[in-house]
Image (cartoon, coloured by chain):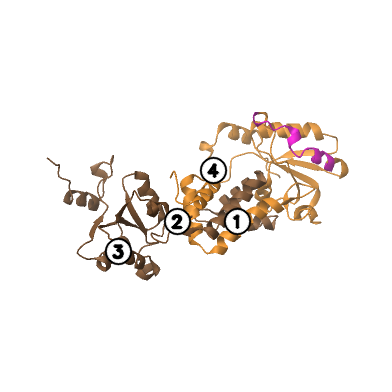
Chain colours: A orange, B brown
Amino acid sequence: MNEFSSNLLQKAVDEISGLPGIGKRTALRLALHILKREQSFAGNLGKAIIDLREKINYCKKCHNISDTDICNICANPKRDNKTICVVEDIRDVMAIENTGQYFGLYHVLGGIISPMEGIGPEELHIDSLQKRCKQEEIDEIFLALPATVEGDTTAFYIYKVLNNATIRFSTIARGIAIGDDLEYADEVTLGRSILNRQVYER
Amino acid sequence: MNEFSSNLLQKAVDEISGLPGIGKRTALRLALHILKREQSFAGNLGKAIIDLREKINYCKKCHNISDTDICNICANPKRDNKTICVVEDIRDVMAIENTGQYFGLYHVLGGIISPMEGIGPEELHIDSLQKRCKQEEIDEIFLALPATVEGDTTAFYIYKVLNNATIRFSTIARGIAIGDDLEYADEVTLGRSILNRQVYER
């Protein structure tokens, strides 16, 4: 695997193996597949990758990926514009949208506070969240951040910065996943799901 | 995972997931990674893919991938040009080169005979192998083809087509891999390795 008979192949394998989770061997397999396919396949693939990075836009309001200045979700008049769901990145937006259970707007932070990786609040889109809360009438900030030290730190920071009498804060419910056995649940999750047990409404 | 907020992202994910072994979820992860990296990364990756397919050359003699008309191996005067190793594709060339145990030339068929997939001898580079055997003085044809029905068929076809009094035919040795236990070997391999047992030289 040290040297290829072609510099073009070497270059392609080097670049493809720069992607996460793809080693030299897989990269070679993909490169040889590209060689076997019709030329338009490589053309379209290469162009899509270049275009994605060059032409991508982010919503000026919520920082979600968008082809327009304001994304479809922010521009949709049917969505509840008094609720903002705060997430780490756009994958979380997709996951929540796929449930079909949330009808408010989003705010994509672009990461979470992590002193270990040198990511402070100023690296994230927290300023613009503050602005949104001042300029618009926001009833609820729904913090859908990871249940890690970093996620909790970020949630706490946002809570401290935005806290005022009119905004209600919420976070996603933690508990035993549907279909999971109690005996295999970790103690922290099981403990929290007991503390936050749901009372039947009468 | 049905719709993205951006057509550029949708297009990139669709194209990337056209690669073998990469599903929509992995494609999205790769696309988001590309978005996070610097612009030159996407530019180089896209260009390498397009260039690979557009500008790639194959050696006119052995059909190995090459940037020149005749590949480094065929052009190397130190190689034994009276021995030709016949392989299915260029990955086999790389594997054999990596052993450092073979010093002859190659001939890349570009596939093997497979009636099930509609691949006959005329789809493969067998004509040019015949030409090489006529034009040059070849001592040995070393068939390094897969040990499958298709591989054996291809080997037999080449043997029938090229057979003459001056060419010696050989094939790679089959047997128990170094480090493997006899008890776990399949019966066909173990059987063959007994039939073809190596006699110590005295």
Viewer-side label of 3, 1: 3
- Which residue position holds label 2? B65
> According to the image, label 1 marks what residue?
A46
Please report, as a chain letter, where disc 1 is located: A
Q: Main secondary structure of the magenta part?
A: helix
Magenta residues span A116-132
Residue topped by disc 4: A180
Given the image, what chain letter belongs to the residue carrying mark 3? B
Q: Report the amino acid beneath label 4.
A: Asp
User: Helix or strand or loop: what does disc 3 sit on?
Assistant: helix
Q: Residue placed farthest to the top in the image? A: A115
User: What quarter of the picture does the N terminus of chain A occupy?
Assistant: top left
Badge 3 and badge 1 both on one subunit? no
Q: Give how far across and how far down residue A131 sits, in percent.
A: 84, 40
Nearest to viewer (mark 4 / mark 1): 1
Seen in the picture, residue A76 relative to A176 is either above or below; the reply is below
